Image (tube, rainbow, N blue to C red):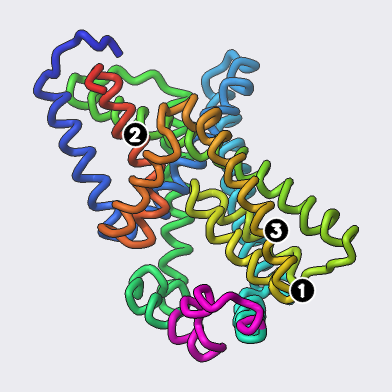
Amino acid sequence: MNKSNPITLPVAISYALMAVALFVVLKSGLLLALFSGLLVHSLVHLMAPKITKRFSNQQARWIAVALLSALIVAAVSALIWAVFAFMRSDTGNLSALLQKLADIIEASRDQMPAWVRDYVPAGVDALRALLTDWLREHADEAKLLGQKAGRIIVHLLLGMIIGSMVALQDATAHVHYRPFAAALHQRAVNLRQIFQKVVFAQVRISLINTFFTAIYLMLVLPLAGIHLPFTKSMIAITFIAGMIPVVGNIVSNTVIVIVALSHGLHTAISSLAFMIVIHKLEYFLNARIIGAHVNARSWELLTAILVMETLFGLHGVVAAPVFYAYIKNELRDRDWV
């Protein structure tokens, strides 16, 4: 975009409509549908040019991209199903892990300094009460089972289908938009590009963090004669939680340090020291990977996450990195920041 171009009425209205749309997505629980659609659209957008350039016939291109879209939707659906299946299995059972964390905290209270003990829940019942209070505060976001499970699956599938259909049109058709439609289309393209940069960069960061965590849990500790329980679950949690910048690492690291308490305070302290090193690595990676792509530093993302969590709850935590990077990108395109 030419930064010297003045903001016309269609462009101004497109900014306003995009702001309203993002607000509605957060307030109406459509974030999963939006992100699943953007994910499929991004994957098709990356792979489609390699396929379409091999076909000269337009109909052949359409069929090839349609098949690619179907394969991507199926692959993403299978991956999500595999994650949920793992979390419900004996190996990755979250309920068992939660119970283990509570037992470790209760058994390890005597090893903790007095100033730490005052901030740690006193036993399983206290931990459950703490979690219950937190769940009540985030009741809308925490109801992931029962009657909302079907709705979530529908949103996920519809989002992916819509994303694949839009990608199919973008990859096989050349549409000449009128000024207002062109402005709206540009907002959507910018959002997709930022989503692609942030999410794919965060996947790389999460994979690196998970790799080092796996080395520590499955190689370093066993060589020292320490075998922590729920190792595979903690590695899985590290990767999944790592998709959220900064905050995800805090969650996974807390779980690892608590489990390490089952082998003594010295193991927990050494684990904490290792996690601090990983945190420093993540800040470096954020600056090098995410910062290089969207010009957003770790402190900016963390501030955005805190503000969005306060305003929108768990949905805000997930949306903050993408939405903040998108807003900053639009401002940079206008040379305002």
The residue that disc 1 covers is 263
Between circles 1 and 2, the one closer to the viewer is 1
Position of residue 170 measured from the top left corner of the image (x, y, whole percent):
43, 27
Q: Is residue 48 left or right of residue 299?
A: right
Q: In this view of the protein, which residue sits in the foreground, 126 or 87? A: 126
Between circles 2 and 3, the one closer to the viewer is 3
How many residues crowd mark 2 within 10 Å: few (<14), some (14–19), many (20+)? many
Query: Can you tell which mark lies on residue 235?
Result: 3
Q: Is residue 156 left or right of residue 271?
A: left
Residue at image coords 62%, 17%: 55
Query: Is there any visible trace of residue 211 in the rendered image?
Result: yes
Residue at image coords 47%, 48%: 36
CA separation, marks 2 and 3?
A: 30 Å
At label 3, which amino acid type do we have? Ile
Residue at image coords 18%, 38%: 17
Circles 1 and 2: CB distance less than 8 Å? no
Q: Would you identify the image quadrant in which residue 69 lies?
A: top right
Q: Would you identify the image quadrant in which residue 21 lies?
A: top left
The residue that disc 2 covers is 326
Query: Can you tell which mark lies on residue 218?
Result: none
Q: Would you identify the image quadrant in which residue 142 lies?
A: bottom left
Tell me the SS state at disc 1. helix
Position of residue 51 measured from the top left corner of the image (x, y, whole percent):
63, 23
Part of the protein shown in magenta: 108-130
- The verdict on residue 116 being magenta is yes
Position of residue 31 measured from the top left corner of the image (x, y, whole percent):
37, 53
Position of residue 147 measured from the top left corner of the image (x, y, whole percent):
41, 78
At label 1, which amino acid type do we have? His
- The verdict on residue 323 being magenta is no
At label 2, which amino acid type do we have? Tyr
Tell me the SS state at disc 2. helix
Q: Earlier in the sequence, mark 1 or mark 3?
A: 3
